[in-house]
Amino acid sequence: QVQLVESGGGSVEAGGSLRLSCAASGDTYYVGCVAWFRQGSGNVREGVASIRTKTQDTDTDYTDSVRRRFTISQDSTKNTVYLQMNALEPEDTAIYYCAGDRFCKGLGDPQIYSYWGQGTQVTVSS
């Protein structure tokens, strides 16, 4: 079994920054990819960023709306993936979830990811 635990959410003003963390435990051998999704008031879970975790290469993917503002990274020694979020906008307000699976399969369909955390709230005020 795999457990994913998010942390780092909070409330900031527009233009501010937050760093989210996703700590993996259990059978992390099966987690070759970690992605961040978010769910705002529209109740649609949107893919934000993903990273391959079993490689030394920088293999990341971002949705267009965050590409120039967010950075996904990992610390393999801690089995932790980070999402650095800069220049936050009110539209970024959502519950942010990390998701894991053996392979990265894009950001379009959250249902293809097998493992999920409980989510962390990010609120950006104007």
Image (spheres, grey):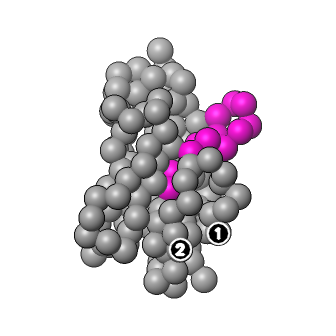
Q: CA distance from mark 2 to mark 1?
A: 9 Å
How crowded is the residue under tag 2: few (<14 C-alpha within 10 Å), some, or many (20+)?
Answer: some
Give the residue number, with chain letter if any, for mark 2. Answer: 102
Earlier in the chain: of badge 2 and badge 1, it is 2
In the image, what residue occupies the spot 55% across and 31% down? 93
Q: SS at mark 2?
A: loop
Q: SS at mark 1?
A: loop
Question: Which of these two is toward me, 9 or 63?
Answer: 63
In this rendering, does residue 9 appear at all? no
Q: Indicate yes or no whether the magenta region holds residue 41.
A: yes
Q: Which residues are magenta?
A: 35-47
Q: Which mark is residue 114?
A: 1
How far from the left and from the top, in percent, is residue 102?
Answer: 53, 74
Dominant secondary structure (helix, strand or loop) of the stretch shown in magenta: strand
Which quadrant, please, contains the N terminus? bottom right
How far from the left and from the top, in percent, is residue 96?
Answer: 55, 46
How far from the left and from the top, in percent, is residue 60?
Answer: 38, 53
Write down the quadrant of residue 86 in the picture.
top left
Which residue type does callout 2 highlight? Arg
Which residue type does callout 1 highlight? Ser
